[in-house]
Image (cartoon, rainbow, N blue to C red):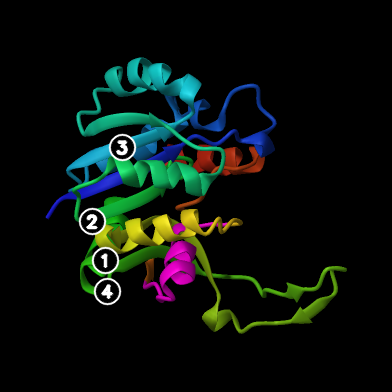
């Protein structure tokens, strides 16, 4: 079996209100993307494909991959205009693998345990999606922001990454949504659901496995990184 991680670092990070893209912002003395790459470098995956902006490919090669000696990063490719297009390019570059792990580079606190749980689930069920149950009550609102439904917290989970799949499932699913021009794809599990009508398997993530999106997230991350 071959295991490939596709790590996404092509986002603009507009909600960060920073002059530098969030994946290159410093966290605990390292660029943010360092932590995700390091986690997968130490995991059982065989190789890593880093998807970044076209203008950042050379920077990532010299200032990230070579500088920190990430030996499993086999390819650095440019992403698309939307996340799902970046994922698709990563999947095309991963041709020949058996299991693919798709991870947001802006989630620096992924652990080997989480990675392994998603792999084991993918081997058994075809998919393994890191996720955590919601802590707060969730309301479904209408277009005018009136609450119209309150789903049971027992059945509401927050999706995380890695989202791990049999390559033979996720690649054709992505091809189908691309061909049909399906948009508003917010995560990879959604692709499998829409394209193949197939349910995905959720596995335990971590409440620390946060995605860095806003300045407030960086403040929390600074606390977490001091405890690593």
Q: CA distance from mark 2 to mark 3?
A: 13 Å
Q: CA distance from mark 1 to mark 4?
A: 5 Å
Figure disc tally:
4
Question: Residue sitting at 37 percent across and 16 percent down?
Answer: 63
Above or below for 82 versus 190: above
Asked whether, in this view, residue 5 is left or right of residue 188, the answer is left
Residue 217: % across, % down = 60, 43
Tell me which numbered mark, 2 or 3, is placed earlier along the sequence. Answer: 3
Q: Decide: marks 2, 1 in contact (CB < 8 A)?
A: yes
Tell me which numbered mark, 4 or 2, is placed earlier along the sequence. Answer: 2
Q: Decide: marks 1, 4 in contact (CB < 8 A)?
A: yes
Between 192 and 181, the one lying in front of the other is 181
Using the rendered view, name the quadrant where residue 89 is placed.
top left
Q: CA distance from mark 2 to mark 1?
A: 8 Å
Secondary structure, mark 2, is strand
Residue 158, visible in the rendered structure = yes
Q: Residues within 10 Å of mark 4 (few under 14, many from 20)?
A: some
> Which residue is denoted by mark 2 in the rendering?
99
> Which residue is denoted by mark 4 in the rendering?
125
Q: CA distance from mark 3 to mark 1?
A: 19 Å
Q: Residues within 10 Å of mark 3 (few under 14, many from 20)?
A: many
> Which residue is denoted by mark 3 in the rendering?
49
> Which residue is denoted by mark 1 in the rendering?
122
Secondary structure, mark 4, is helix
Residue 179: % across, % down = 48, 55
Above or below for 138 versus 19: below
Span of residues in magenta = 185-201
Q: Decide: marks 4, 2 in contact (CB < 8 A)?
A: no
* Quarter in which the N terminus is drawn: bottom left
């Amino acid at each position: 079996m071959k295991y490939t991680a596709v790590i996404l670092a092509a986002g603009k990070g507009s909600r960060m209100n920073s002059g530098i893209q969030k994946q290159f912002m410093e966290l605990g003395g390292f660029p943010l993307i360092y932590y995700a790459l390091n986690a997968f470098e130490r995991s059982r995956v065989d190789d890593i494909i880093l998807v970044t902006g076209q203008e950042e490919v050379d920077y990532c090669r010299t200032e990230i991959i070579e500088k920190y000696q990430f030996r499993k990063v086999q390819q650095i490719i440019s992403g698309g205009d939307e996340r799902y297009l970046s994922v698709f390019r990563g999947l095309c570059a991963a041709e020949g693998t058996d299991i693919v792990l798709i991870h947001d580079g802006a989630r620096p606190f992924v652990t080997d345990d989480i990675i392994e749980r998603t792999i084991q689930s993918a081997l058994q069920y075809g998919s393994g999606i890191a996720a955590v149950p919601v802590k707060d009550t969730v309301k479904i609102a209408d277009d005018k922001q009136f609450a119209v439904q309150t789903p049971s917290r027992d059945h509401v989970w927050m999706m995380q990454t890695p989202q791990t799949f049999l390559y033979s499932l996720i690649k054709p699913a992505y091809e189908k949504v691309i061909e049909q021009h399906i948009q508003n794809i917010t995560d990879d599990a959604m692709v499998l659901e829409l394209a193949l009508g197939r349910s995905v398997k959720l596995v335990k993530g971590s409440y620390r496995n946060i995605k860095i999106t806003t300045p407030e997230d960086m403040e929390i991350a600074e606390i977490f990184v001091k405890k690593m």
